Image (cartoon, rainbow, N blue to C red):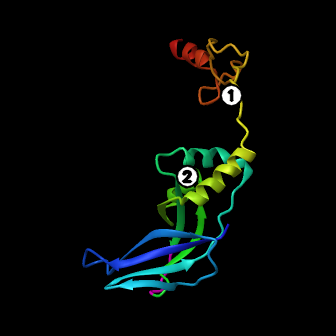
């Protein structure tokens, strides 16, 4: 589903940041746009920055379900800063998966904006999850039959009589020191 990403530029609150940018809305089914100005009031301007596609995958349904059961279901807009003043961000993707957004946030190279999911998109994602979600049965892992209470004497060969050998058995080395 194509989603238009709306970014708002407002004056910065410090002298070091001239502008403050944030994602304020998504437009479901929007056409292509390349930083088209939507609205301007005083020094605040809204831009239709880009129109990436929201893609859903059947193996990610657990993450979508987690996002839908949140108090406020959200979409996550992943952006990468650029050097251009006219286009300060490249829109990398829009996702409904909080897990995928967390993966991008861990790198620290991208800016992640969280925005409330419109009701139409929430119902579309919910229908996708209902169609493709399969609950995974918990399988408890069994321990090996190996006896872990055995005491390991060392990794060396006790037949080696050299004092400088690092792979010698510790018991043999102790006996040699005591003699």
Residue 10 place in picture, x, y as percent: 35, 78
How many numbered tags mark residues here? 2
Question: Circle 2: is it few (<14), some (14-19), or many (20+) Cα within 10 Å?
Answer: many
Q: Please give left or right for residue 92 compared with residue 129 in the image.
A: left
Quarter that holds the N terminus: bottom right
| Residue that mark 2 sits on | 98
Assess disc 1: are there few (<14), some (14-19) or many (≥20) residues with their C-alpha within 10 Å of its C-alpha: few
* Front residue of this view, candidates 93 and 25: 25
Q: Is residue 157 above or below residue 126?
A: above
Q: Is residue 60 visible?
A: no
Q: Position of residue 128 (x, y in %)?
A: 70, 51
Determine the CA span between mark 2 and mark 1.
22 Å
Q: Quadrant of the C terminus?
A: top right
> How far across and how far down the image is residue 122, in percent?
59, 55
Asked if disc 2 and disc 1 are in contact, CB closer than 8 Å, the reply is no
Q: Is residue 176 above or below residue 30?
A: above
Range of magenta residues: 81-85
- Image point 46% across, 46% down: which residue? 71
Residue 26: x, y in percent?
A: 53, 69
Q: Which residue is more in the foreground, 167 or 61?
A: 61
- Local SS, label 2: helix
Depth check: give the residue in front, 41 or 51: 41
Read off the residue under disc 1: 138
| Image vertical order of residue 101 relative to residue 8, above or below | above
**On the picture, is 133 further left or further right than 99?**
right
The label on residue 175 is: none
Report the magenta stretch's main SS. loop
Q: Secondary structure at mark 1?
A: loop
The stretch drawn in magenta includes residue 13: no
Residue 172 in view, yes or no: yes
The answer to if 83 sits in the magenta stretch is yes
């Amino acid at each position: 589903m194509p989603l238009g990403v709306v970014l708002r530029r407002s004056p910065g609150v410090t002298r070091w940041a001239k502008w403050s940018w944030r994602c304020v809305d998504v437009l479901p089914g929007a056409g292509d746009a390349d930083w088209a100005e939507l609205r301007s009031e005083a020094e605040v301007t809204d831009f239709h920055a880009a129109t990436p596609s929201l893609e859903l995958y059947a193996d990610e349904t657990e993450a979508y379900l987690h996002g839908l059961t949140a108090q406020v279901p959200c979409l996550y807009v992943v952006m990468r800063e650029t050097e251009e003043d006219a286009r300060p961000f490249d829109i990398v993707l829009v996702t409904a998966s909080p897990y995928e957004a967390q993966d991008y946030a861990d790198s620290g190279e991208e800016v992640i904006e969280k925005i409330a999911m419109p009701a139409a998109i929430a119902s579309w994602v919910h229908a996708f999850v209902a169609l493709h979600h399969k609950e995974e049965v918990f399988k408890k892992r069994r321990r090996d039959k190996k006896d872990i209470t055995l005491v390991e004497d060392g990794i060396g060969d006790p037949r080696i009589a050299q004092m400088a050998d690092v792979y010698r058995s510790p018991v043999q080395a102790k006996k040699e020191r005591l003699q």
